[in-house]
Amino acid sequence: MMKSLLFLLLATTSLSAAADGLLLDLIVPPRDGDRFQHAEFSCWIAEASKPVKAVIIHQHGCTNASPDKHPPITSDWHWRALARKHDAALLVPMYHVAKNCDEWNDPDSGSERALLAALDDFAQRSERPELKDARWVLWGHSGGSSWSSQMIVRHPGRVLAASFRGGCHKQFGDPAFRARFGPVARDLPLLFVWGKRETVSTSSHFVSWEPMNAMFRELRSSGGKVCRVIDPRSEHGCDDSRLTSISFFDAVLSGKAEAMASNDSSESWMPNAAFAKLWREFSETGTLRPIEPKLTAPELTVTRDAKGQARLTWRIVPEISGGLRALRVYRDGKLWKEIGLKPVDYLATSRDSTPEVLRGDGLTDDSAELHDYSLSFLDAAGNESRRGYP
């Protein structure tokens, strides 16, 4: 009874301001033997009435989670676009520990138990029982990659695809682990993303460079579906790498694999020709610049309070390979406000969260006068969508 009350007190459910899906939160306390202090989970489902086909788990790296600087991507328009397209839930664990990374990124620390408890809770509250047993799409950064690699071994057949942004030096540096991982992951679509500046010995993250390459070579020599991409602009931060990870997941989940790999085990496996083109562009530039993409106009809602002030809220569905760089708010047909990033800024924080300037989903016009409003957005290349109107 006390356990049920505790979960009830620490669980919240909400609709976003723009009424975009169902957002659920949960705090899971540790049990005896667990090494984390507490675990926060956030889950987003686009359509609570539609069956959930997969769960995209976005796992942060080492150090304590800092939601103020790096909030969960359950409120990120770009990740939501991927989840919405493939009827997937977004799930973000955030573990708080007293000391070291291994207090959570070892599944035996209690993080595996906490994840399964969260899936069970979210399945019940969303009234989507299939969420509990749905297959996983794993994205991990650094220590999150280490955790993800271990979960693949512990749950063979449960994972649909995985993307590792750095990390895994303890796992992939261990021949015994590689021997267990290889057979389980050989037919699993994998993306390894490393920063160019991680490949030099002066980097503190160089420790994972050769272990990653050893795992890559072993998987490819056995016919494994693993793609390796080196971000030319980065060290260990996520930066614009979401453009490749989200595009990779989209290609795999769309079921459009075309067996693009050659017999050369030094070359990456590609899910299809379209992704291979994006891979080449990202490998050269560290970002993607879509040309004439088909951008969907945002949905804009305008309400007025008792003082007559207008409250604007929006829902945005970016194009998968272009993401979101800025918003443009028009008033009476003229550009009124541009909210977003500079052309030189990365699309995400170092831990792949939404940059602070893009975290809102609305604004208030302090003017009491009546105005007409419209809204557009810019992608990574500065392409502007059509305007959305109330």
Image: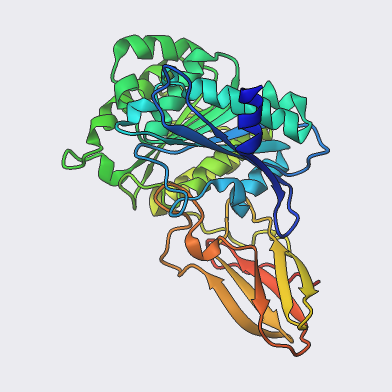
Q: Residue furthest left?
A: 202
Residue 213 visible in the picture: yes
Q: Residue furthest right?
A: 49
Asked whether 325 or 68 is in front, the reply is 68
Q: Residue furthest front?
A: 2
Asked whether 284 or 366 is in front, the reply is 366
Quarter of image, res 170: top left
**Residue 144, x across and y down, in percent:** 42, 32
Asked whether 237 or 192 is in front, the reply is 237
**Residue 307, x across and y down, in percent:** 76, 83
Q: Is residue 176 above or below residue 250?
A: above
State the quadrant of the C terminus. Answer: bottom right
**In percent of the image, x 76 and y 86: which residue is there?**
371
**In percent of the image, x 37 and y 17: which residue is there?**
218
State the quadrant of the N terminus. Answer: top right
**In percent of the image, x 71 and y 29: which residue is there?**
123
Q: Is residue 382 above or below residue 278?
A: below
Number of marks present in the image shown:
0
**Residue 18, x across and y down, in percent:** 73, 59
Quarter of image, res 216: top left
**Residue 352, x across and y down, in percent:** 46, 48
Residue 386 visible in the picture: no
